[in-house]
Image (cartoon, rainbow, N blue to C red):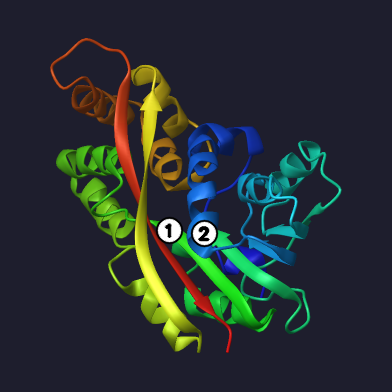
Amino acid sequence: MNGSETSNFVSADGEGYELQMGRWSRQLAPLLIDFAGINRAERVLDVGCGTGNLSFALARNPEIGGICGLDRSAEYIDHAGRNNSDSRIRFQVGDACELPFPDANFDCTISMLVLQFIPKPDIAVREMRRVTRPGGTVAAATWDTRGGFVAYRMICDAAAMLDQRGNAWRARSLTRPMSRPGELRDVWVAAGLIEVEQDMVTIRMNFECFDDFWSPAEGREGPISEYVTALEGEAKARLRDAVRLAYLDGEDDGPRSYAATAWVVRGKVP
């Protein structure tokens, strides 16, 4: 089993990911670390590290001895490595469902905005528990795509309004695993973790103008781009126009700010 079979997130370019999601994951990372209670650790594993924003946030704490960031995308790992100047951090390619580490190898294992794109996230969570020592913390965050991710929902709703294919895509996008109330907690408990808590945290996504909002959709990263780039020219233009109307909301083009809520969960290895 390889990484392409255990994730359905489209990844192609680190700079593209930074434009599409990295600028928001930098805001989310400190909130997840605080919720997880990672204050001091010899070794921390960042599962699905992408371009490294969670790993870099962890490294701001001098009480953390070493950080390993792992991702299935060689492009993202290359991007993270080029931007890393901290000797405590190392990045490597790997599969969240087959972590290449021995049992009880880390004090804490953490994952941000990844589990929703793993078709069998329970396998990944069991792997996260396996590589974490007894008493260690396993934590994660996923977007609340249906009820708390305004910018994402605007595009999904516009697509659903236009045709049946867009409606089917919205249904798949808004009901990804680990995106609904209690799902993360249930998987943590099923994996045998204890003292499990699930909560939510919210950031603001600030855009300079509609082009800043829409341009990531024309890229190659993630589910929105996958859908938009598959549309033919006229269909893509109709979707763009519909989303633009939603963005403008009857006012002139310019800055907008939207809330984005993530579910967060933590538990201990018994």
Q: Residues within 10 Å of mark 1 (few under 14, many from 20)?
A: many
Residue 50 position, x and y percent, is 63, 49
User: As drawn, which residue projects farthest toward the right?
Assistant: 87
The residue under the point 44% across, 62% down is 116
Query: For the residue marked with disc 1, what is the amino acid?
Result: Thr
Residue at 40% across / 73% down in the picture?
197
> Residue 223, image x and y in percent?
43, 48
Q: Which residue is mark 2?
A: 114
Residue bearing the label numbered 1: 142
Say which quarter of the image contains residue 264.
Answer: bottom left
- Tell me where residue 153 sits by quadrant: top left
Pointers 2 and 1 in contact (C-beta within 8 Å): yes
Q: Nearer the viewer, residue 185 or 171?
A: 185
* Marked residue nearer the N-terminal end (2 or 1): 2
| Quarter in which the C terminus is drawn | bottom right
Is residue 177 visible in the rendered image? The answer is: no
Which image quarter holds the N terminus?
A: bottom right
Q: Residue at x 75, y 60 (%)?
A: 68
Q: Residue furthest left?
A: 250
Question: Of tags 2 and 1, which is closer to the observer?
Answer: 1
Label 2's element?
loop
Disc 2/disc 1 C-alpha distance (Å): 7 Å
Q: Is residue 30 left or right of residue 181?
A: right
Q: Visible in this render: residue 255?
A: yes
Crowding near the residue tagged with mark 2, few <14, some 14–19, many ≥20 C-alpha atoms within 10 Å: many
Q: Is residue 86 above or below residue 243?
A: below
Name the quadrant containing residue 187. Answer: bottom left
